Image: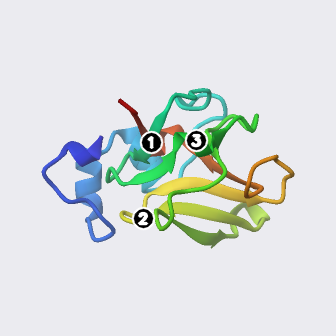
Amino acid sequence: MASNTDVNLDKSTPENKWKEVLSTEEYQILRQKGTEPAGTGQYNKIYKDGEYNCAGCGATLYKSDTKFDSGCGWPAFYAEIPGAVDRHVDSSFGMKRTEITCSKCGGHLGHVFEGEGFKTPTDERHCVNSRSLKFQAKN
C-alpha cells in the first residue's frame, strides 16, 4: 500500500510519485479512473469485521458493517465514513453517474448509485474497485 511510504500522499502529490508508489493496476484505477473487471476483485465477497482504507493514501473510507452483497461484481457499501469520500458528476459513456473519490488524495474509487431498492438504510450502492481499497481487519 502506498501509505507504507515515508511520503504524505494527498491531492497535491505529483503523478510521478504516484507511479512510484502504486502498482500498475492501482495506478490505472486510482489515478486514471479505470475499472477492474466485475467479479475479479479480492474484496467482492469478503465480509470480515474491519475497515476499508484507500489503497493510495491509507485514509479510512468504509467500515465493514456498511458492506453488503449487491450482486454487482464489485464491493458494495451503503455509506462512507463521513467526509472520507467526495462525489463528482461523471458524464462519460453517454450516461450520468456519480463518481466517488478519496477526499484526501483524490483517488478514483468507483461510482455511487441511488434508488435501486436495496434494503439498506440509505438505498445507496457505492460500487468500489477492490484495487482502490486495502482491508484492515479488526483485532
Q: How crowded is mark 2: few (under 14 residues within 10 Å), some or many (20 or more)?
A: many
Q: Where is residue 105 in the image (x, y as percent from the top left)?
A: 36, 63
Label ID, residue 65: 3
Tell me the quarter of the picture where residue 98 sits. bottom right
Crowdedness near tag 1: few (<14), some (14–19) or many (≥20) residues, C-alpha within 10 Å: some
Q: Can residue 33 be seen in this view?
A: no
Disc nearer the start of the sequence (1/2)? 1
Residue under numbered circle 2: 106
Kind of residue at badge 2 = Gly
SS for callout 1? strand
For numbered disc 3, what is the local secondary structure?
Answer: helix
**Looking at the image, is mark 1 or mark 3 earlier in the sequence?**
1
- Residue 8 located left or right of residue 50: left
Q: Residue 51 carries which label?
A: 1
Say the numbered circle drawn on residue 17: none
138 over 115 or under it: above or below: above
Measured from the top left, where is residue 69 in percent x and y?
71, 34
